[in-house]
Amino acid sequence: MTYSGDLMGNLGKRAVILGGSMAGMCAAGAVAPHFDEVVVLERDEIPADAEHRRGVPQSKHPHFLLNSGRRAIEEIFPGYEDALIDAGALHLMPSLAAAHCEGSGWIPRQEGSMTMVYASRLLIERTLRARLAEVPGIRVEEGVSVMGLQIDGNARSGGRVSGVWVAGGEAGPERRLLDADLVVDALGRGSAVSDWLHKAGWPEVPVQSLDAGVTYTSQWFQKPADLPESWWWAHMSVMPTVEPGDHPPEHDFLCQIFPIEGDRVLVTLGSWGHPMPRKEDEFLDSVHKVRAPGFGRAVDLCEPISKVFVTKSTGNKRRRYDQVSNPPAGLVHVGDAICGFNPFYGQGMSAAAKSALLLKTKLADATAVDTPFVTDYLAAQRQLLDDIWTLALARDQGYANAEGTEVAPRWRQKLAYRASWPAFNHISATTREDQVVEEHFSRVFNLDESVTTFVKNPRVVAGLAWFAVKRAFGRNRLPLGFDNQADPPSDIWRDGKPHPGGRVQPLPKGAKPAGAMAKGA
């Protein structure tokens, strides 16, 4: 990987990145062409094999690197995706590789317009860290605590962040000042940057929030060496039931057997408001109460290789720096430091990468990192985050136990609660028979198209309505679902007919599915 030196230092001597996780590393790569030196400050000391660490509690759970995020990282670090696949990540077409249970049962297996790369958060970060080490001028300091900002001037006179106060790392425990021409806040949900700005005279940063009480629990397993014929799939998912009435709480769970490198899987159970298992025996008991018994049968074939991990830190939180008048020059924010999403939806890494790519684009046209630049960047970032924020809140607003500034009126909560899963299942069924709807829905899922644009698209609306008519008269070409009490069928459906299907094989690097919008998938 090579970087042009033509622009080195054109915006200053040093950029400092606060935080060395995915958002921080993407930001470091984005700003590197424009500064003589980029210093990444990381609180943790990261071992060479990148084990789970305090700063990334979500690393124990499945992570989706959505396609827009894949492309954003690839633009910042050319060759990243190939390196990730070479390291063991799985490049798959979900519509062929996943056994997916929703609505009435297992959905038909067929080709689609989307591919995805499956890997653990550990591998995703380790591979990116290796690419980061190849970029000239970037230096990572580990074991460093960020203590505060050095701010020249104030909100009235036009202040500027000119440095960062730190302690720890190679220089020792003494508090010291690190000068900077640009500071990127990638400190995550717990970032104290907004508090430091307020103490320096800026108004409080408005905060939007919504926490629907989502809890999920995961355990790592090793797959068996010899898979039975029934295990043709790479990924299994079981969606919550839409059936009313009494049923086990596990029927309300969203369940995943998620493939990662090394022939391992992460088994994850998630719910909105239900108590979740925390011990190994409780976890296995819940696994066998999932509404598709094949889920539990598959887990029984695997060997547990970890304890059970539980997280309840799933609220949506957005700091509205874009609403602060006269923001300080020399300071921008990426990742959860500005907008943290419910991680159960897999949007965080991709949103952070897209923000970093936006920063790279804006810096390419900049002559200074002054207040007008920061204001312009925040306005463009607002539009980027608005679309993802709307999608994240759409589901979480449907629960009476939800808390925060964005709690919906009770009538809307009831409507969202009753309609969200049936609506999702209807859209999903339509995508299997309408390529245009499928392509647009894939773009929404991968954060390439806003959900607002999707629901206002006349062709999408017509497609959804037409499928509802066909469904009502029994004219749908594909079955709506197969018996969820049996193992998922491996047949591949083409032209409305089933054909024998075999074991899933990863796609070659760079493979693109057929379809009018495949290039954007």
Image (spheres, helix red, strand yellow):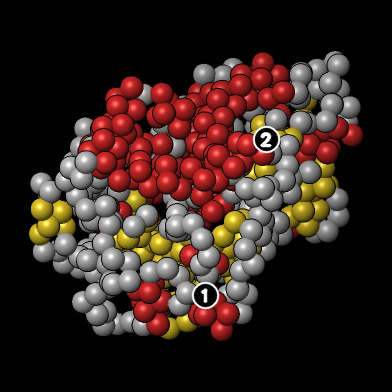
Q: Earlier in the sequence, mark 2 or mark 1?
A: 1
**Nearer to us in this view, 140 or 342:** 342
The answer to whether residue 48 is left or right of residue 266 is right
Task: Tell me, yes or no, whether the two marked residues, 2 and 1, touch with CB atoms within 8 Å.
Answer: no
Q: Secondary structure at mark 1?
A: helix
The disc at residue 409 is: 2
- Name the spot of residue 87 as percent of width and height, x first: 37, 62
- Name the spot of residue 263 as percent of width and height, x first: 35, 73
Vertical order, 76 against 510 (above or below): above
- Structural distance between the alpha carbons of marks 2 and 1: 33 Å
For residue 151, which quarter of the picture? top right
Could you tell me if residue 503 is visible in this image?
yes
Vertical order, 361 against 71 (above or below): above
Other-residue count near label 2 (Cα within 10 Å), few / some / many at <14 / 14–19 / ≥20: few
- Name the spot of residue 494 as percent of width and height, x first: 12, 50
The disc at residue 286 is: 1
The disc at residue 319 is: none
Type of the residue with mark 1: Ser
- Name the spot of residue 341 as percent of width and height, x first: 60, 45
